[in-house]
Every structure is written in C-alpha cells, then in structure tokens.
Amino acid sequence: MSVLIESIETLLVDLPTIRPHKLSMATMATQTMVIVRLRCADGVEGIGEATTIGGLSYGPESPESMKLNLDTYLAPMLVGQAADNLNALMARLDKVAKGNTIAKSALETALLDAQGKRLGVSVASLLGGARHTHLPVLWTLASGDTERDIEEAERRLSDRRHRDFKLKIGANRLDDDVRHVAAIKAALGDRASVRVDVNQAWDEPTAVRGISALQEAGVELIEQATPAHEHAGLTRLANRFEVAMLADEGVQDSRDGLSLIHHGFSGAFALKIAKSGGPRGALRLAHLAQAAGIGLYGGTMLEGTIGTVASLHAWATLPEMTWGTEMFGPLLLTDDIVTRPLTFSEFGVTLPGGPGLGVSLDEDKLREYARR
Ligand code: MUC
Ligand code: MG
C-alpha cells in the first residue's frame, strides 16, 4: 500500500548575506528562500527549497509568488496522492502549471527527500548512485570593489576554500568592468582560475569587444554574455573565441539545450535544479549535453543548504564536471537553518551521508528567520 501525502507547508525565510552581492540586475543584502515541508501519512517529512535571486529581477518567479503558487495551485495537486510515484506526481504539477520551475523543484526535492528517508537511502542513490562524495566549489567575487575582491580571493585561497573565482560584471561601463577583472586576474595569476558572469547584460557587439579584452586578460570562462533567448548569437560567440562560453539563463531545460545544440553551440551548460524543475530535469539536460559533447557546470541560484544539497546529490551522480560547481550558496549567508551545515574544505564540499538529503531543519533557527 502506498503512503499518502498528508500536508504541504511553505515558509518564507529571510537570511542576511555576509556582504552586498552585486549582480548586473540586482544587489542582494538578503537571500529569501521558500522552504517546503511535505508530510506523509507514515510520519516521514521531506524538505525542499525554492530560491531565486533579487526578487523578480532574475526571472519570472519571485519568493512571494512561489509561496502563493505553491499554496494555491501546486501543493493541492499532491496532497492525498501516493508519495512514492515521482513520475506521476511531477506530471500532475506540469498539468496544472506551466513553467514555475523553481517552485516545482522545491516539491521534487521534498518528494525525493521523503522517499529516501522512507527507504533508508540517499537522494543520490534514488538518482542512480553517487560517483563522488567531494565536489569542487568556486566562489563569486561580487563586492563591487576591486581591492576588496582581491583580499577576499586571497583569503579563500590561503584557507584552501576556493581556487576558482567567478566575477559578476555587466552593471558598469565595459572599460571599467574589464579593468576590474584584469586587475583581479593579474593579482591572482596562475594560482586561481578567473571566470566572469555577465548575466545577459551585453548586446552582441559589446560582447565581442568585452570578450576579446577578457580573453587577453586570461579569463577562462564567459557566462551568459548576451540575452538568454539569443541562441544563434551565443553560438557565434562560442565559435569566434577561444575562451569558452557558458550558457546559463539561455539554457533552462532540455528544450533550450536541444536548441543550442541545433545551432551548433560548443561550450558548456550551467545546470540548475531551479531552472529545470528539479534534480531529475537538471540531469536530463546534463545527459543531453554529454551526448552532444557539451561541457557541464553545477550551477546555483544562491540557494541555502537545502537547495544546495539537493543539487549536490544530482551533480554527484555525473562524471566529473568540466567546470566544477558553484555550490557555495550557504557560505554567502550569515547563518543557516539546518542542524548540521555542509563541510567546505580542500576547495570543495562534501556530500552529506544519511538517508534522503542528509540534512535536517533547525526548528529554532527556522522560527528566528521565518517571515512573519
Ligand atoms: C548566476 O547567474 O549564475 C550564481 C553564482 C552567483 O554569484 O550568482 C548566481 C547566479
Ligand atoms: Mg549565471
């Protein structure tokens, strides 16, 4: 007899960031996550997280809209259903709601966590089995100040925390951005890999000028230089330059992946469970990329520990990723809402053991940071 889903609760949780995090479309001082608690008739609870960046500025879902849509449309489709048939449950969600991939990802995560706990196996096992238990993690330098970014990078290098750095650019004049990136790369030299994320801020002619200068400065990877929908343009840039292009906002799911492949894109895809409606959708995109010879990168929406761990369980099932991962979200926050935070060491993070996600909510912390 299948166990039924009894209730689904959602909470908005606001956690301050350790410093302002400046992206081309927003500056973050707080991260807001929607935490999902999915309770089943056998007493098992699965947890999930829906998180985006900068309110509504990154994509079409905001934390507040996700909570509303989860409560009003998505959760009622799951309550009363058998908890163990993920294929049927996710199809019910797709039937009632187009898009809303971040909210759906939180529910898929909670369902995987519950099923793993019930069976006594990890989420990675449910996804086919972990091939790694320690994954590389980069750090994003985005204080907005060159000297402060260099100091931050030096500290992270000497702590053996991170040796790959992603710089957020696109908000300033091109020349200023190039000067900023070149100064950081010159200071770090061969001790670190430096990449940039433009978050769609350039048009193609600006991208050509910017990428030439950044390639010259020794940057290794250029993330989403141009608008998300411009698949032909991104492919032209990938063909034109030696430095690798990474598609992020432009590759939400397998459909986008297929379109880029059809255009002849060579480069890499940033996988995010939030973009693909959950860990399984992100893995479908990864498998497509692998078949087409496209590189992989484990991306984040700057989730807290729950979303980060859910992603790690998925990335752990893949062969080593070409460009590593950026699963540093919890390190950008001043506190955590789980009882045992993740262990970051030796330039990476350790996949937690135990059934399900392998992390538990800290009820006191949850109460402290839950929005009233
Ligand atoms: C993005 O667009 O990649 C990932 C790291 C970071 O600092 O911002 C995110 C979003
Ligand atoms: Mg990005």
Image (cartoon, grey):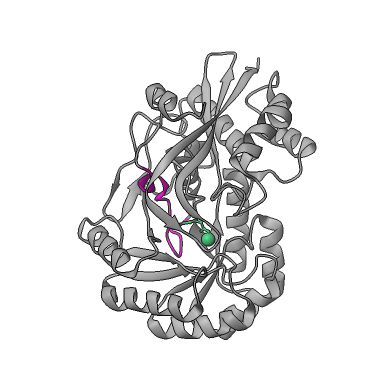
Q: Residue at x 42, y 86 (%)?
A: 216
**Is residue 85 found left or right of 121 in the rendered image?**
right
Magenta residues (range):
319-333
Q: Residue at x 61, y 63 (%)?
A: 291
Q: Residue at x 35, y 64 (%)?
A: 164
Q: Is residue 244 visible?
A: yes
Against 5, residue 289 (above or below) is below
Q: Position of residue 79 (x, y in %)?
A: 68, 21
Question: Is 159 in the magenta?
Answer: no
Front in this rendered view, residue 321 or 28 = 28
Quadrant of residue 279 in the image? top right
Looking at this rendering, what residue extends furthest in the right direction?
Answer: 95
Front in this rendered view, residue 240 or 29 = 29
Q: Position of residue 300 (x, y in %)?
A: 49, 52
Q: Position of residue 360 (x, y in %)?
A: 41, 27
Front in this rendered view, residue 80 or 14 = 14
Q: Position of residue 203 (x, y in %)?
A: 63, 76
**Is residue 247 found left or right of 178 in the rendered image?**
right
Q: Is residue 129 visible?
A: no
Q: Main secondary structure of the magenta part?
A: loop
Against 62, residue 115 (above or below) is above
Quadrant of residue 12 in the image? top right
Against 177, residue 247 (above or below) is above
Against 154, residue 17 (above or below) is above
| On-image quarter of the N terminus | top right
**Is residue 140 found left or right of 50 in the rendered image?**
left
